[in-house]
Amino acid sequence: MRLGFARTVKLTLASFFIQTSWSFTSLQHLGFLFTLSSGVREKTQTKLLHKCKTIFNTHPYMVSYIIGAVLRAFDEGQSTPGRIDRFVSIAQASFATAGDLLFWQTIRPALFLGAVILGLKIGIMGPIAVLVVYNALHLFHRIRGFQEGYEKGDDIIYLLRTRRFTLVQRVFEFLGALFTGGLLTLLTLDFNALLVIPLCMLFIGLLLKRTASTIIIIIAIIATMIIVLV
């Protein structure tokens, strides 16, 4: 099943406002309903308000996967209140965790380090280029999520096990390690390329051993102090 171009555009535009009505009582619930209502047929909107009553909160970039699956349930007439609430309660936690790990803890820190390095070397065009890359990644998930959620329905949760998420996360973990070593060298010396290699290998080794990020940061600070003092 296909969602269609026009509905995808409407849903994408609506999803940018999903957090504008955030509250402590319902979290993203109103924004979730608003985005859903822009994709269902007009005669279904009343049913939507009565059937989707659960509190909703997930990663804003990943919400499209859930909305696409719920839209398919409404289109196929399988939108019983209990079924929708059970799926949403499970999916929102799963995609919240995946989005936090992928974007907040991996992609964003790595690209931030890259933006600092490029900014120091080539000026303002460096951070602008990094912003373009970051938004391309987040828009891919935001737009593609509606289509895949609609195609897979409830099975969309199993998408989190695919290489799209695990491989990208590993790639940006390595990039973060490389950028950390490069930035330390750039800040302490006149970019000695020979020093970059051992620093980068150190942080990659710590990542492979699943060392806590706090310990890696402490080691980075100590390494910087040693280099400066010596």
Image (spheres, helix red, strand yellow):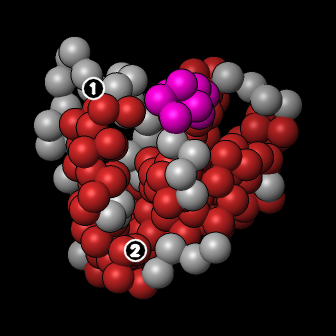
* Image side of residue 185 versus residue 211, left or right: left
Q: How many marks?
A: 2
> Callout 2: helix, strand or loop?
helix
Q: Which residue is mark 2?
A: 8
> In the figure, 144 relative to 122: above or below?
above
Asked if the residues shown at circle 2 and circle 1 are in contact, with their CB atoms under 8 angstroms apart, the answer is no
Q: Is residue 35 visible?
A: no
Image coords of residue 65 (percent x, y): 53, 54
Q: Residue 169 appears at what percent x and percent y?
A: 68, 51
Measuring 37% from the left and 33% from the top, which residue is drawn there? 52
Left or right: residue 123 versus residue 166 is left
The answer, for residue 43, to whether it is visible in the render is yes
For this orientation, the residue located farthest to the bottom is 5
Mark 1: amino acid: Leu
Any mark on residue 27, and which?
A: 1
* C-alpha distance separating marks 2 and 1: 24 Å
> Can residue 61 be found in the magenta stretch?
no
Magenta region, residue range: 80-90
Q: Residue at x 51, y 42 (%)?
A: 79
Residue pictured at 32% horizontal, 42% vertical:
47
Residue 113 x/y as whole percent: 46, 54
Sequence-first disc among 2 and 1: 2
Mark 1 element type: loop
Say which of 15 and 175 sits in front: 15
